[in-house]
Amino acid sequence: MTEVLSSVPLPRQKSITTKWIGGPGTGKTSVLLDYLKKEIEEYDNNITDIQFLSFSKAQVEDVKNRIRELLPKKIQGILKKHIRTIHGAALSSMIQLGYINLNRSSEGGWTVISDDKKYSKYYYQDFSNQHGLTYEYNLGTLFTDDNTPRFMKSIPEGNAFFAINNHLAGKMWDYDLWPTAIYKLGMRVDKRLIDTTLFTHWEKYKKSHRLLEHEDYCKMALEIRPVLPGKVLFIDEFQDMSPSHYALFEMWRDQGTFERIYIAGDPNQSIYGFRGCDPTYLINTSGIGEGAYGENIPQSHRCPSMIIDFADTVLGEVSNMTPSREGGIIEWFGPNQALYGFEIDGVIDKILILQQKFQRVMVLCRFQSQIKKWHDAFNQRGIPHLAISKKYDTWDKLHSECKHKQSIGKILPALHGFDRYHNGENESSISLDDARTFIRLIPLDEKIKSGLINFLNHKNPEKPVMVSTLIGQLSMWIEGLDPHSLIDKIAIKEKHAQSIRNLLHLAVENQYYFSPDSILLDTLHSSKGLQSPAVLIDCSFIKDRTDDVIIDPSEERRVGYVGVTRASEHVVLIEPFNAVWNPVFETAKERWHGFY
């Protein structure tokens, strides 16, 4: 089936909109996929009749994987044309109509740039140089979930300018509102170097170099109004709508071709105000109310009653869900166990106890600057851990230097097996996969490695490999097969060799053989969409931000709410030491102790 796009108004029909509202763990995406299955089975539609949109590439990939189970293999190759981000749908429609050509080698080709992409660095730097602005590429995007750069004493004017420009574009504000944007963003910047004409100069620069930022092609789509093909439109995570996103939605809704529209979200989880997102778009969009806006409030498959009660205390409102069951634990940790003082080991011991009990723990902070302190504290004890947003060199980013690069965390099961064997457990064994990984990490000739792996491949894959068997094979080429000797033999790039070996030696000494993904560390924002049996929240804050939160705590409450509702069993609130309280959690503690 060939899709034909048009910017010519088509005969209009009024679409029927279904709006499903549900809190954390209620399965909003699953509900949309049930509607999609109904469209295919009962309304005789196929994937070419459907557009399924969400906000991040990760969400889109997750939906694609889940939809593949519903569709015949012969049509799975066209999924990318029908399951995509809202930005992606706008860009694709403009490409198909011929307004945008992303082939730079052809005449009139465009390049999409973003201040978090390395290939875009030249253009941002060049424009800043031309206009006497300092610009530091390594700062990246200033206004993400980490607002720490906002409170730097001196933000490079170029970085500040591009952040303001992005905010204006997302909010669909005129350029002369740039002082308001600075105020809304809480930015410290020398206003003498920025004026309205600078924004028009940036537009001219982009046009002359054939450059498009994400909001540029969204704006073009709103002007040209290309038709998004399909009969049924799905939009997940609708609470994350910004003004430009919502304008695109209204355009597609009103184009007259969609018979039915399904949207899902939770206004209590709208936490991207720095991008202009506003939960009122979801609340005020008319449609047939389902889920919490229907007759039956959905049940969370994750959060028990105590955790929902506390989350509601943080939020200051009632959740759009009922509990999975009775129970759950809310625990306050401190102030005797100093978070950033000499007693941080007490906090880490608590984390390790919960990891041992539940096998998985999240440690969440409000700002990136706080994550760095936790990251360093974990490394000082050799504790395996990962950063959810991949911004730090946690155990998944540190690799060996062998032909087949392996994350250092993957050698832990093998080290554990060798450790048990050297401590008298003659029947010690490891899985076949772990044995293969271990062999790839040690510095042997590739032919010898291939021979060892071939030897293992002839074994039953369902049976573990005896460590004694591995030692018998390896002892022909390697001396010293105890864990610490093996660590010193792993091929690692010289730049990171000492630090990686130190981490592994500490892990062996302290018997930290659990998988690095057992402890996840990151910001409250980065945890959205994830879950863990136990969640620990650092309740400290940035002093300069407290007044803003006290004046309008609504979004900060939602951020805290998202963090608390990642937990299915146990929430620990870590009280600040030598730092200010997050006003939202300080208030929640007072109210919680008043109720319980």
Image (cartoon, rainbow, N blue to C red):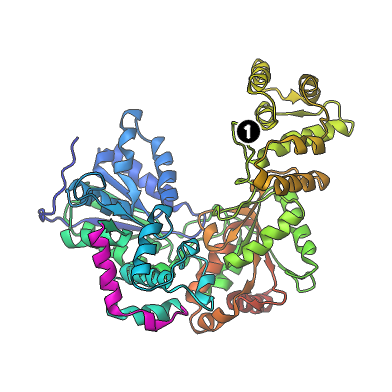
**Residue 311 placement (x, y as % from top left):** 57, 67
Q: Mark 1 points at which residue?
A: 402
Amino acid type assigned to the residue bearing label 1 in the image: Cys
Q: In which quarter of the image is residue 546?
A: bottom right
Give the extent of the magenta segment.
Answer: 187-209
> Which residue is at the front of the view, 530 or 214?
214
Left or right for 261, reference 298: left
Query: Is 84 above or below relative to 527?
Result: above
- Residue at x 46%, y 72% (from the top left corner): 156
Residue placed furthest toward the right: 424
**Residue 20 placement (x, y as % from top left):** 38, 57
Left or right for 570, reference 180: right
- Residue at x 58%, y 68% (from the top left corner): 366
> Which residue is at the front of the view, 389 or 198?
198
> Which residue is at the front of the view, 590 or 585?
585
- Residue at x 55%, y 58% (from the top left corner): 527
**Residue 371 placement (x, y as % from top left):** 62, 62
